[in-house]
Each structure stands twice: as structure tokens, then as C-alpha cells.
Image: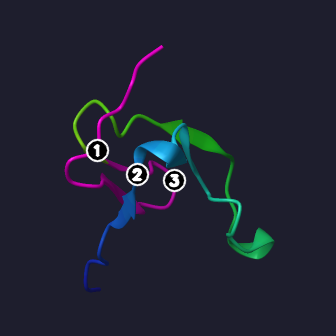
Amino acid sequence: MPQQKPIIVSAKDLPLHCPSDASALWASHPRVFLDVANTGQVACPYCGTQYQLKAGEVVAHH
């Protein structure tokens, strides 16, 4: 199976969670929050969807 391109997210999309609100209910899994700010990329442990922080994005930590 070919690897899919990562979903590019920006700082305004944080906190990042999978599945997204746009995901179909039938394709859903328990919501998990993902830390993309630490390394710039992360994979969902349930479905394997890859997320990548947009180049040049600055994440302000609270």
C-alpha cells in the first residue's frame, strides 16, 4: 500500500486531534490529541494518518 502524503497543519489548527471533525463517523476511532509542535510531524497511533506542521509556523506554548 503506498504511503499517503501527510496532512499539513498550521498553528491555528492546534491543539491537533485525530480523527478530525470532518472525518466520517463510520471511519472514526477514539479521539486522540497529537503533539505535532515538538518534532514538526506526528502519526496517529490508531489510523496512522501522518500530520506535518506547515514550514515556518511558530507555535506559542502557554
How many C-alpha atoms fall within 10 Å of the one at disc 3: few (<14), some, or many (≥20)?
Answer: few
Query: Residue at the bottom extreme?
Result: 1
Magenta-drawn segment: 42-62
Of badges 1 and 3, nearer the viewer stands 1
Amino acid carrying label 2: it is Ser
Amino acid carrying label 3: it is Tyr
The answer to whether the residue labelled 1 contacts the one labelled 2, judged by CB atoms less than 8 Å apart, is yes
Residue 61 lies, with reference to residue 36, above or below; the image says above
Residue 42 in the figure: left or right of residue 39: right
Assess whether residue 60 is covered by the magenta stretch. Answer: yes
Residue 27 in the figure: left or right of residue 52: right
Q: Which residue is mark 3?
A: 46
| Element marked by disc 1 | loop
Q: Which residue is mark 1?
A: 57
Residue 1 in the figure: left or right of residue 62: left
Distance, label 1 to label 3, CA atoms, is 26 Å
Q: Residue at x 44, y 51 (%)?
A: 44
| Element marked by disc 2 | loop
- On the image, the x and y values in percent for residue 24 come to 73, 74
Amino acid carrying label 1: it is Glu
Q: Residue at x 52, y 48 (%)?
A: 13
- On the image, the x and y values in percent for residue 47 come to 49, 61
Query: Residue 49 occupies which quadrant of the picture?
Result: bottom left
Assess whether residue 9 is covered by the magenta stretch. Answer: no
Distance, label 1 to label 2, CA atoms, is 6 Å
| Element marked by disc 3 | loop
Q: Residue at x 28, y 44 (%)?
A: 57
